[in-house]
Image (cartoon, grey):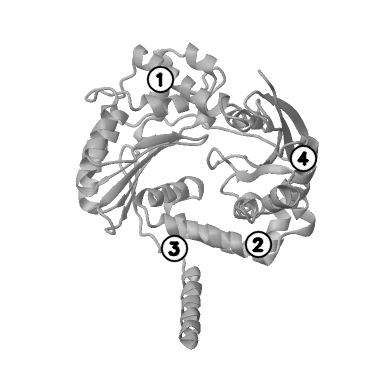
Amino acid sequence: MRRFTAALAAVLLIAASNALAQDPARIKIDAYTLPNGLRVQLVEDHSSQVVAVDLWYDVGARNEVAGRTGFAHLFEHMMFQGSKNLKKVEHSQLLERAGSSDANASTQYDITYYYATVPSNRLNLALWLEAERMRGLNVTAEGLKNQVDAVKEERRLRVDNQPYSRAIWEGTLAAFDAKSCFGYSHSLIGSMADLEAAKVEDVQSFFKTYYAPNNAVLTLVGDLNPAEAKQLIAEYFGGIPRQPTPPAVTCDQPFNPGALRQELKDDKATLPAVLALYRIPATSHADGPALDLLATILGQGESSRLNKVLARETKAALGTTVLVNPFGPRRGPGMFFGLAIANQGVTADSVEKLLVKEITQVAQTGVSAAELTKARNQYRAGKINERQRSLALAEAVQFANTYLGGPEAVNTDLDRYARVTVDDIRRVAATYLRSDNALTITIVPEKK
């Protein structure tokens, strides 16, 4: 029995090793563009009887201008308010009745996207619904007021009434110059004053400028027949007229401009906290994978460095995390930050010293090969898992197209991470995680 058990253990170990060595399956993408400029990406996958419909518009908070902020996020709500042939919220109701359970939308600094996973025999409905609101959203004064109120409520929920959220959502914006890089220096949710002052004409103009076929990418992944899908797409989207190309966005944000500090009072926090932020380059930059893996090593998971040193060994922190671009990937400069919430009786100064030490010492001491291997395996596991879900794969294809130069990059993205070395980790730490490139935010509890 012992020999059998040992032999079985050996077989399982070999199987596990082989599983770890696997790479994500290569994806075949059928990409083309309609005459009106709508870009289409089709991935045929019959492993389940559903299709993910993922429509990305090239518009986000970075496209907004001073005095008109919050419009990108507002449209995440407005797009469900009806159109010529749809009543308010009927879009969601029809998808739900068709069997969709994940129809929704999201706004980031660079994009706004709308998605739904539907049974494959209802693909026509999902496509018609997206084309219907792209063709002519119903923008009324009443609908505008209702959705401005909805945005206010979302702000209260996500920012105003959550401890430490204001530091992350708004305090971090100070890292970006408001004059040379307005796109990334203002709130993703937007100014409530700007939204209150918005007129129907302003919202209609924003819609016409950015919600056009030539400013969108439609990706379908799942149980589809390519010829039938193309016919439906041409039928529903082909007649929507293209619009002039939206104005370009620029961001001139220098690195290492000098250390910045600020103190924020938080009446929802009961313990002090420290956030150490460092500016990093665009998601497409060659240093991006090394920075992502370093964030995993430093502050993601129970075995991360910050958790071991600040939470378990010194017990200085109640919790820690390290994040890269928490509001989504960027085509412009981004942020890498570590957050530590002080334990009871521990000062913010003490936590800051430990936090900054753990982050910045990587430039001198580097990371171990074992740490890097573990972080790479975690990333690879995530890429393999995303192949199992239609919507996750659709978003991976969209991500590759938007941030890595084209949809085919979904098949080579993992290679960028596999090439990262311990020397690369040390180099990016020395390049970006330095005091003259940092914004340090101390969060102080404040009683009402």
Number of the front mark, 3 or 2: 2
Q: Is residue 226 above or below residue 244?
A: below
For label 2, the crowd category at 10 Å Cα-Cα, with few meaning under 14, some 14 to 19 and many 20 or more, is some
Amino acid type of disc 2?
A: Glu
Disc 4 or 3, which lies upstream in sequence? 3
Quarter of the image for residue 410 reads bottom left
Q: Position of residue 5 (x, y in %)?
A: 47, 82
The residue where tag 1 is placed is 147
* Label 3 sits on residue: 24
Vertical arrangement, residue 296 with respect to residue 83, above or below: below
Q: Badge 1: few (under 14), some or many (20 or more) residues near its Cα, within 10 Å?
A: some
Whichever of labels 1 and 4 marks the residue nearer the N terminus, that label is 1
User: Marks 4 and 3, how far apart in space?
Assistant: 40 Å
Residue 163 picture quarter: top right
Q: Which residue is mark 2?
A: 371
State the SS at label 3.
Answer: loop
